[in-house]
Image: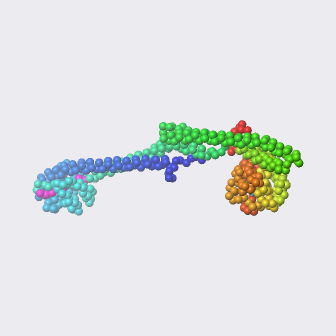
Amino acid sequence: MRAPAPVRSQGRTLRARLVATVLILLALACAVIGVVTALALRQSLIGQLDDDLRSATQRFAHSAMQHPPGSQPPPPSGDYLGPGQVLGTLGARIQDGQVVGARVSNRGGEYQALDPMDYPALLAVRPGAHPVSVSLSNLGSYRMAAVTAPDGSTLVVGLPEARSHDVLNELVTIELVVIGLTLLGAGVAGAVLVRRELRPLERVAETAAKVSALPLDRGEVELVERVPNVDPATEVGQVGAALNRMLDNVGGALEARQESEMRLRQFIADASHELRTPLAAIRGYAELTRRDGPAVPRDTAYALIRISSQAERMTTLVEDLLLLARLDAGRPLERAPVDLTRLVLDAVSDAHAAGPGHRWQLALPDEPVTILGDGSRLAQVLANLLANARTHTPPGTSVTVGLAQETDNGGGAVLTVSDTGPGIPAALLPHIFERFARGEKSRSRAQGSTGLGLAIVHAVVAAHRGAVGVRSVPGLTEFTVRLPGGGLGAADAPDHAAPAGTPV
Ligand SMILES: Nc1ncnc2c1ncn2[C@@H]1O[C@H](COP(=O)(O)OP(=O)(O)OP(=O)(O)O)[C@@H](O)[C@H]1O
Ligand SMILES: [Mg+2]
């Protein structure tokens, strides 16, 4: 049996969808945390930088007061911006809208003049306003503030933002690495956990698949499949438990169905059996009374003939019903070598005697065809097919009986009965092997036909594990019976297996 496919929805497994959903949610949460952390850190770094800038501005203002612009040349190194300024601090003095000095402290404790290209950026800084970020051509991003000196000039001070940016970049890098590793770990762990949690669901699907492959429509069915290890505390376990309860229920219903079928078969078989004796008695007494000859009035004699013929017909019907009930119950057939060629010859010769108006033809192979099976039942198959070819076609019709040994199929046999009669009505054809299926009911009944002949053919052939088919057009009707070489009887066929001790 095929293993059931994993639980699927729109082409993707439930497992994959669950893991993907968890990962997406986790990624979203990580992104929110990461962005908020980075923003908060940036805010705090800028605040700190602004504090430093305020102190740097005070120191520069103090130094600038001691070295007014007229006291050129510039003060010695380290004194221009005042003491204690950090590396890279920028200081500029603006007088009458002109930058009169702009320097940046460098590594050797010296000052370096600012590129005049950046002067417009310095002029844009408003004294007393909140610090602003300015991008300088060679030095990168600076945080700048300006104050007005007592002499009326404007002092601009800037601190490099590079360090804050480095700290922020480092945080973002660390965050990305940690989030990536977290998602990877969560993906692997999630896949393993979800697989483990869904395993009971796979067991449910496996059980359902096994049950769906069982033939539940006929015969005795043992419904033993159940979902193993169900834990009713979980939702999946509840599904399993519900399926098990349903299987209990279905099992019970199937048992009841089988029992009632067996009772019905038994009843039909018993009834048919019981009817045989009174029918034989009726036929016997009618015959006996008729033998009295002239003593019997004419009308009574006619009535006796009708009684005999109807009793005859009823006997056939009862025999047919009994045979069908026995085949249904799976009563074992005989299993002995059957010479089909011999059977065909006898049956055609009987048919010839019964229907001399028809043209009977044989298409037999040179070698006799033999299979294992039940000779008398197979003779009945032939008799029923030939009776049909005789009674449902007009005199003059050609009937051909063919037989062939099959080389494959375990050396089985193919038997065909074809006639050139008017054919089977198209509406009847699909139901032809059903019980009591007849064409033109009123006429058939008058002819003494019951519609069980082909049902018996079908049941006997099925009990031999063979197959019967028909094709019919006006002018050619052909029945084909295939019998396997082994000719297994019903006892070996599980479909027809009857429980021991069911005498029919
Ligand atoms: N060779 C045939 N040509 C035409 N119709 C046929 C042929 N064989 C069967 N049929 C049709 O199929 C119907 C069913 O056949 P079936 O043998 O089961 O029942 P029956 O012949 O009517 O009755 P009985 O139980 O006496 O055989 C027939 O009533 C007839 O209409
Ligand atoms: Mg018939």
Return the residue found at the far right: 294
Number of marks in picture: 0
- The picture quadrant where one finds residue 398 is bottom right
The location of residue 98, given as percent across then percent down, is: 16, 62
Q: Residue at x 22, y 60 (%)?
A: 121
Q: Nearer the viewer, residue 305 or 349?
A: 305
Quadrant, the C terminus: top right
Q: Residue at x 17, y 60 (%)?
A: 99
- The answer to whether residue 328 is left or right of residue 39 is right
Magenta stretch secondary structure, dominant? strand
Colour setup of the view: rainbow
* Residue 82 sits inside the magenta stretch: no
Residue 207 in percent (x, y) is at 57, 43
* Residue drawn 25% across the image and 53% down it: 160
Q: Can residue 339 be seen by looking at this rendering?
A: no
Q: Examine the image and state in which quarter residue 210 appears.
A: top right
Which of the 4 image quarters holds residue 271? top right
Q: Seen in the image, is 281 located left or right of residue 111?
A: right
Residue visible at 68% across and 54% down? 431
- List x then y, in percent, for residue 119: 21, 61
Q: Which x, y percent locates residue 395? A: 81, 60
Q: Nearer the viewer, residue 6 or 236?
A: 236
Q: Nearer the viewer, residue 46 or 464?
A: 464
Residue 50 seen in the current view: yes
Q: Nearer the viewer, residue 503 or 354?
A: 354
Region in magenta: 152-160
